[in-house]
Image: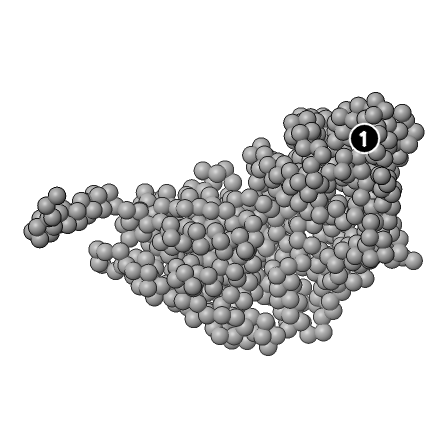
Amino acid sequence: MRPLSSFGLRAALAAFVVLLAVPASQAQQPLKVGIVTFLSGPAAGPFGVPARNAAELTAELLNAGTVPAPYSQKGFGGTPIELVIIDEAGGPQKQVAEYRNLVPRVDIVIGYISSGDCLAIAPVAEEQKKLTVLFDCGTPRIFEDASYKYVFRTGPTGTMDNVSVALYLVERTPNVKSIAGLNQNYAWGQDSWADFENAMKTLKPGIEVKTSQMPKLFAGQFGAEITTLLGSGAEVVHSSMWGGDLEGLVLQGAPRGLFEKHKVVLSAGEPAINRLGTRIPDGTILGARGPFGPFAPDTDLARWLKTTYQDRYHVPPNYASFKMTQAILGVKAAYEKAKGSGNGAPDQDKIIAALENLTFEGPGGPVKMALGKGHQAIMDAAVGTTKVEGGELKIVDVARYSADKVNPPDGVKSEAWIKSGLKK
Amino acid sequence: MSSILPVAFDGIAYASWLFLISAGLTLIYGVMRILNVAHGSLYALGAYAACSLAGAWLGGGLPAAGSFAMLLLAAVLVGSLVGPLIERGLLQWMYGKDEVVLVLITYAVFLIMEDVIKLVWGVDSLLLPEPYALPGNFQLGGLPYPVYNVLLIALALATGLILAWALYRTRQGKLLLAVIHDREMSMAMGINVSRVYLATFAVGATLAALGGAFTAPTIAVTPGIGVEVIVLAFAVVVIGGLGSLGGAALGALLVGLVRSATVRYWPEAELFSIYAVMAMVLIARPKGLFAAQEARKI
């Protein structure tokens, strides 16, 4: 065969380039967003599936261009988004392997509910140089113990939850003298209790800690723990439990009078509202890991999420749903800021620069990427008390705390900030 | 004294629950030499079936006391349908293989059943609080306790006594003991070992489901409850001696009491206490407290 002449070669190459370019301009390539959330295991019901549902709903409505302002532009800057959803179950080691498989398939990763998974994924994201937005996990250690370029978290840390319930409690029962805890025996439960205990000691010096119960995660049965709490004489019982453990605590504790004898504080109790309803006794202090679900402000964006989610899934969106939508909208805001008025897709570094220190509107209100050198969000906190009215569980006496009041300044570790008097 | 009573009661209540879930596991191991990991999912299946049956019963406006019968029915249904299905459909082809292979096979069954449960019931928790709240509370040492826990203790006692009677006082039980002692010799003497295996697995599965069904009213039934249970049940059975019913009872009591005392006096060590008991027992008696003597084969 005769070799192609230089002209022929150039013509063939040009034709090839044109062929490649045509489909791209005719049908726009979607932006691929990896979504990692629990689809199986005990965290799927309370968090994983509500978050997955929110991701699917948000992506679909963004692509349709029906999300309220400032997110009414279709997709991300006009480019449709396509989700690649994977299961978070299996533990950090498995998740690291799953993450490595996911990275080449997607442009951005949004995910992770478990603090253990977040701590494991963050350094791998850095190594893989892939923009990774953590949406739910609570441990403040991620940006307090390390610094990342490619990792962000658009949800507030767990510190804020426990500081805000402590403030709420002391405002309402200023003479409180003793507390007790019932928390799951792993990072989340231990950190939550430490933050609450330290915040209470700061706010009420000399407060007595009667007992700190640490049952195994997913133990489900707390007969002996409830006995000990009932006999402890503590005025307040704090629990950061979630999922089946939290529901088990209410089911076992309420008939035994735990909620009548003690003021019970459920710092992450909001998702249980949809499951337990009026079974949660009156007077229980409840947090939602931020201004989410029933604590969401009355904005177009919050109403949009509540209505569209309820219509499609026939339950209200819980805090996991809010935080997932918030993460997607945060990335969209950064993407569009990075894109500016240009036509081309912004490169990853530009999106990262845009997301750093960004303030954007989420369905739970304003989100400031204020900690961890602009990589960690802070938000206002909200706490309320349960009350059954007309056969329905309502949240009453809601107090809001500004983000600055319940989060440490940038560069100060949460624990040190709480112990040093919650000062700015 | 005022703190000993609550500790003892909580310990015994927990032990009863542990015994219910461990009895079937040790029975199956004793007879079939299978460490049945799928026991955990049979427990979960019992809990889910109980939620569906008792939930339908209560939803139909029928008398609440009848929900207890539904819990029993759920256990029997799971045991008599799913137990034989696993044994006839899978395990009977695997007998004679290495014990480790059988553990892996039952682990595979466990994983499949976890997904089947998710397909049927979804990932949201199921709640069945009525039977737990129905009998009310009683006072002990000045603290309220659920009467339901007394029922649980009675159920465990009855289960243990019926099992012991069936094993040691009936003809079928004696045939089973013969199979435990020497499978080959039993076959030579004309015992239908295959039928004994089927019956044992069905009874073991029913016991697992019974544990699940009667736990359902006290917890939120969620995916993954079987995993938690199987680890605990293994610990109890290993403490008591694999294959020993009395061992399972004593192991459950020991773990229950130690855990309850730890929760009261040293809550940080709760997780550690169960395995500390196991380690100490195994140091003193490597085959557990009541390990059956192996028949010497020449």
Give residue A148's position: percent from left, percent from top.
Answer: 44, 67
Name the image colouring.
one colour
- Judging depth in this view, the residue of B18 and B88 nearest the camera is B88
In this rendering, the count of numbered labels is: 1
- Judging depth in this view, the residue of A139 and B81 nearest the camera is B81
- Judging depth in this view, the residue of A165 and A334 nearest the camera is A334
Give residue A313's position: percent from left, percent from top.
Answer: 48, 38
- Name the residue: 30% across, 57% down: A336
Q: Amino acid at mark 1?
A: Glu
- Name the residue: 75% across, 61% down: B269
Q: Secondary structure at mark 1?
A: helix
The residue identified by callout 1 is B184
Judge the density around disc 1: few (<14), some (14-19), many (≥20) Cα neighbours within 10 Å.
few
Q: Indicate left or right for B158 with A147 as reference.
A: right
Give above or below for A11 relative to A404: above
- Name the residue: 43% across, 58% down: A133
Give residue A374's position: percent from left, percent from top.
Answer: 41, 68
Quadrant the N terminus of chain A occupies: top left
* Quadrant of res B291: top right
- Judging depth in this view, the residue of B298 and A409 nearest the camera is B298
Give residue A332's position: percent from left, percent from top.
Answer: 35, 55
Q: Indicate left or right for A213 with B1 as reference.
A: left
Q: Indicate left or right for A29 with A376 as reference.
A: left
Chain at tag 1: B
In this view of the protein, can residue A87 be seen by the observer? yes
* Quadrant of res A388: top right
In this view of the protein, can residue A396 be seen by the observer? no
Q: Residue furthest front?
A: B298
- Name the residue: 89% across, 53% down: B5
